[in-house]
Amino acid sequence: MHGIRTISDSEQSPTWERVQERLLALKHEKTLTLDVDDDTFLIVLFTEPVGYLVSGCGVGDKDWHTLIDRSLGDDIVTAFDGGDTRSFPRYVFVDAPLLLKAMETYYRTGERDRTCEWVETDQTFYD
C-alpha cells in the first residue's frame, strides 16, 4: 500500500508510474499536489529553467519543509511560486533525478525521504 491517496484532487490511488509521468510533464509555473491525507501532502512547482520546488508536510510534520540540493549554490533566483514572485536561493530548485528519488519515498510511505536534505520552508526564500 502506498502513501499517496490523490494527485491534485483529480486522480485517486495513482500508480507510481502515473505519478512520475505527471511530475515530469509539468509545464513552467504549474504545480502538482500529492496528498496522503488532509495534513500530509507535497506540492511540486516546476520553474524553467531552474527545476522543481518541492514543499509540504510529511506524516507527523508540524511545519512545512522544502527539498533542497545545497550543491546548486545560493545564488538568488526570482520565481513565481503560485501566489507571489519571490527571491529564492538556487538550491531550492532541484533536478528531476532528486525530485523522483524524494517523491518515490513519499509515494510509498507518506513520509519525507530522510536521505534527502529538507529544511523548514520559511528558510527557503529571501523576501
Image (spheres, grey):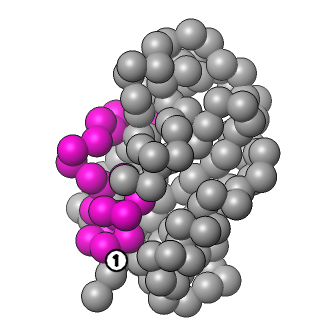
Q: What is the number of callouts on the image? A: 1
On whether residue 75 falls in the magenta region, the answer is no
* Residue 57 in sight: no
| Residue assigned mark 1 | 3
Q: Is residue 103 above or below residue 14?
A: above
Percent across and percent down for residue 92 are 50, 30
Q: Is residue 127 above or below residue 24?
A: above
Label 1 secondary element: loop
Percent across and percent down for residue 119 are 34, 34
What crowding class fits label 1: few (fewer than 14 Cα within 10 Å), some (14-19), or many (20 or more)?
A: many
Please name whichever residue, 91 or 123, is drawn nearer the observer in this view of the structure: 91
Q: Amino acid at mark 1?
A: Gly
Quadrant in the picture for residue 67? top left
For the record, the magenta segment spans 102-122
Please name whichever residue, 16 or 79, is drawn nearer the observer in this view of the structure: 16
* Residue 111 in sight: yes
On whether residue 107 falls in the magenta region, the answer is yes
Quadrant in the picture for residue 105? bottom left
If the image is split into quadrants, where does the N terminus sit? bottom left
Percent across and percent down for residue 61 are 28, 55
Which residue: 63% across, 73% down? 8
Judge from the rendering whether residue 28 lies leftward or rightward of residue 109; answer left or right.
right
Which residue: 58% across, 42% down? 52
Q: Is residue 81 above or below residue 85?
A: below
Percent across and percent down for residue 99 are 46, 49
Which residue: 70% across, 60% down? 25
Judge from the rendering whether residue 126 lies leftward or rightward of residue 35; answer left or right.
right
Which residue: 56% across, 77% down? 18
